[in-house]
Image (cartoon, grey):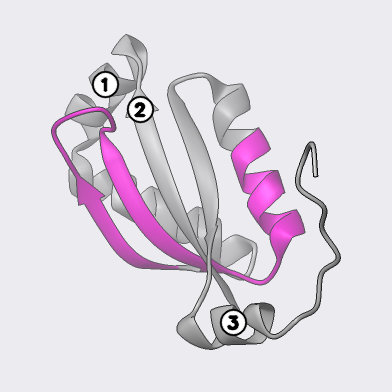
Amino acid sequence: MKKYLIKGVYNAEGTKGLIKEGGSGRRAAVEKMLGEIGGKVESFYYAFGENDVYLVIELPDEISATALALRVNAAGLVRISITALLTPAEIDEASKKSVSYRAPGE
């Protein structure tokens, strides 16, 4: 399965819901949602700063990741971004792939 990093920012209403439900309640809801689409949570952290929540998750494919982002962002209480994560072996494979590229102005 593919791994993804999710960064999320709660708006005021989302924060009120988080306070009401608690961090453990939100994690349980996310685990349930991911399980329904064949995924799972690897790590789940709340944080101070630019983002309120960070998750590393596993999903079967990019379609599942896109469906997740669409559904969560459409709800409007937390804004998430999803980044595909690559293993060192995947970087090794990519670095061996030939790509014809001409830089601008060359």
The kind of residue on which mark 3 rests is Glu
* Residue sticking out furthest to the top: 12
Residue 70 is left or right of residue 5, and the answer is right
Marker disc for residue 15: 1
CA neighbours of label 3 inside 10 A, class few (<14), some (14 to 19), many (20+): few
Whether residue 54 is in magenta: the answer is yes
* Residue sticking out furthest to the right: 100
Using the rendered view, name the quadrant where residue 104 is placed: top right
Closer to the camera in the image, 85 or 9: 85
Q: Is residue 68 above or below residue 39?
A: above
Q: Determine which residue is flagged by label 3.
A: 90
Q: Say what secondary structure mark 3 lies in.
A: helix
Magenta residues?
41-70
The kind of residue on which mark 2 rests is Val
Q: Determine which residue is flagged by label 2.
A: 9
Q: Residue at x 61, y 40 (%)?
A: 69
Of pointers 2 and 3, the one earlier in the residue sequence? 2
Q: How far apart are the alpha carbons under marks 2 and 1?
A: 9 Å
